[in-house]
Image (cartoon, rainbow, N blue to C red):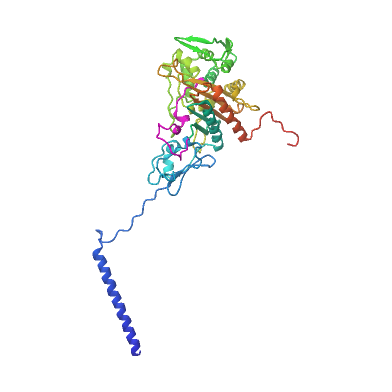
């Protein structure tokens, strides 16, 4: 090695030693000035807890009704479709975008399925409702139009699958979009699911169930006849009819003319325990009709408090307050050949807990009569539809005498011969007419017409020609 090479080696060695000295001085300075934890070593960064996204809510066919985005926003892609059934969650609203951001602000679901299924949704589990989006659309559009035309305060329409009890549509008016600005519960009428959260008296729709009870108990036949003046006294009360009719009526004619006098006269063949016993079998007293969901409990008298006046009132739908859902499920028993099936809103439904209430021939005989004497505005040319109208006077604290508040109802089958669904329509405080035959029946007919077209059921009058 020559002298130049030796000098280069020494120079490199010196530079390395100087760099090491400077590095050690800097590290020592950092260690002297930086605060140390009690352990003497810096703690590693703690990972933030991962909040699982809220589960989605879908209709029966997979249509998304409620979704959570990655940024935590809860969105409702179908807008007002089944809005009160889906419900909403409470979170912060972005004033610029209008979106509800529930990330870190999520509270339990405030209504509908968002509340009822909170346990599953909060664990990122998805929920499938029994709602059919097409039938829900048909029911909502018909109901909203009918409520506007009648000037009703609110309305609801239920479409219940006959055999399974699935709620294929639960429409409410006024409409509600869960993603839109809203008022406080109790102040904003759009938030209420009137099908579940309001009590009504069944009115004359109950006459069909009373007639079925009479037939089932062997207390009457359809061709039995009673005296039926336009009014009669029961104890200190007067029962009146509205529609003019012959002075003597068969049980079938009592249904046709919707006679309070005739039905209350037939009901004297039953005792209070028998009539209320069938009400119980029809789950009209059930305080937990749809487990998990908020459904108001009925108001009723126990049998020991049902005297002759109360028995007469019950026979034609007064003195008992139930939700529209209770009434729809009870009426569906006639559609289902006398077998009660509980309503269901969440899939999978599985095997329903059924209970036979009436003999099949009793239910079929009732459907035949209700089809033959169906209200004109509920009829659909080429199709066999049947049902019962109702005009329910709402009792005040002073009884019925001074009440001017009414609910108009129609409960029917689509089709009447072999029902596929039961449809119930309720309008509360309609202004143009209080009669279900005038304001509720047309809504039923529109729902039935669109449902039959959706299912591809042709009218009976259609005859295909050669080659078609």
User: How many callouts does the rendering have?
Assistant: 0
Residue 37 counted in the magenta span: no
Whole-percent x, y for residue 219 in the image: 54, 15
Q: Is 268 rendered above or below residue 468?
A: above
Give the quadrant of the C terminus.
top right
For the point 35% across and 90% down, the residue is 2
Whole-percent x, y for residue 365 in the image: 59, 21
The residue lying toward the viewer, choosing from 192 and 335, is 192
For the point 37% across and 51% down, the residue is 49
The residue lying toward the viewer, choosing from 251 and 403, is 403
The residue lying toward the viewer, choosing from 400 and 301, is 400
Residue 181 in view, yes or no: yes
Whole-percent x, y for residue 208 in the image: 54, 20
Q: Which residue occupies the extreme bottom position in the image? A: 2
Residue 337 in view, yes or no: no
Magenta part of the chain: 176-203
């Amino acid at each position: 090695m020559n002298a130049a090479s030796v000098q280069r080696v020494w120079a490199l060695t010196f530079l390395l030693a100087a760099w090491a000295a400077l590095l050690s001085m800097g590290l020592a300075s950092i260690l002297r000035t930086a605060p140390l934890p009690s352990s003497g070593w810096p703690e590693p960064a703690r990972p933030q807890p991962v909040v699982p996204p809220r589960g989605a809510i879908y209709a029966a066919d997979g249509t998304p009704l409620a979704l959570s985005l990655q940024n935590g926003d809860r969105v409702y892609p179908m807008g007002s479709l089944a809005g009160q059934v889906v419900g909403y969650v409470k979170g912060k609203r972005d004033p610029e975008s209008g979106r509800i951001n529930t990330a870190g602000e999520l509270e339990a679901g405030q209504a509908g399925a968002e509340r009822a299924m909170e346990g599953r949704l909060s664990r990122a589990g998805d929920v499938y409702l029994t709602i059919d989006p097409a039938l829900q659309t048909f029911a909502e559009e018909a109901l909203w139009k009918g409520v506007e035309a009648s000037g009703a305060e609110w309305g609801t329409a239920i479409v219940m699958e006959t055999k399974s009890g699935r709620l294929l549509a639960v429409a409410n008016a006024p409409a509600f979009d869960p993603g839109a600005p809203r008022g406080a519960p109790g102040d904003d009428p759009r938030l209420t699911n009137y099908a579940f959260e309001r009590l009504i008296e069944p009115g004359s729709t109950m006459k069909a169930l009373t007639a079925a009870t009479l037939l089932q108990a062997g207390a009457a036949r359809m061709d039995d006849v009673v005296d039926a003046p336009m009014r009669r006294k029961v104890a200190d009360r007067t029962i009146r009819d509205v529609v003019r009719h012959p002075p003597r009526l068969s049980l079938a004619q009592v249904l046709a003319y919707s006679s309070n006098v005739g039905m209350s006269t037939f009901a004297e063949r039953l005792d209070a325990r028998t009539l209320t016993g069938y009400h119980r079998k029809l789950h009209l007293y059930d305080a937990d009709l749809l487990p998990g969901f908020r459904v108001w409990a009925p108001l009723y008298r126990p049998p020991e408090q049902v005297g002759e006046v109360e028995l007469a009132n019950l026979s034609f739908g007064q003195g008992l307050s139930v939700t529209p859902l209770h009434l729809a499920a009870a009426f569906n028993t006639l559609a289902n050949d006398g077998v009660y099936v509980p309503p269901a809103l969440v899939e999978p439904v599985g095997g329903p807990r059924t209970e036979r209430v009436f003999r099949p021939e009793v239910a079929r005989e009732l459907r035949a009569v209700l089809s033959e004497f169906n209200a004109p505005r509920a009829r659909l040319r080429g199709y066999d539809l049947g049902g019962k109208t109702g005009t329910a006077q709402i009792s005040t604290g002073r009884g019925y005498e001074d009440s001017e508040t009414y609910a108009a109802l129609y409960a029917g089958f689509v089709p009447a011969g072999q029902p596929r669904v039961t449809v119930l329509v309720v309008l509360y405080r309609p202004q143009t007419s209080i009669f279900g035959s005038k304001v509720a029946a047309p809504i039923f007919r529109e729902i039935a017409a669109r449902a039959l077209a959706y299912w591809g059921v042709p009218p009976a009058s259609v005859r295909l020609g050669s080659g078609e």
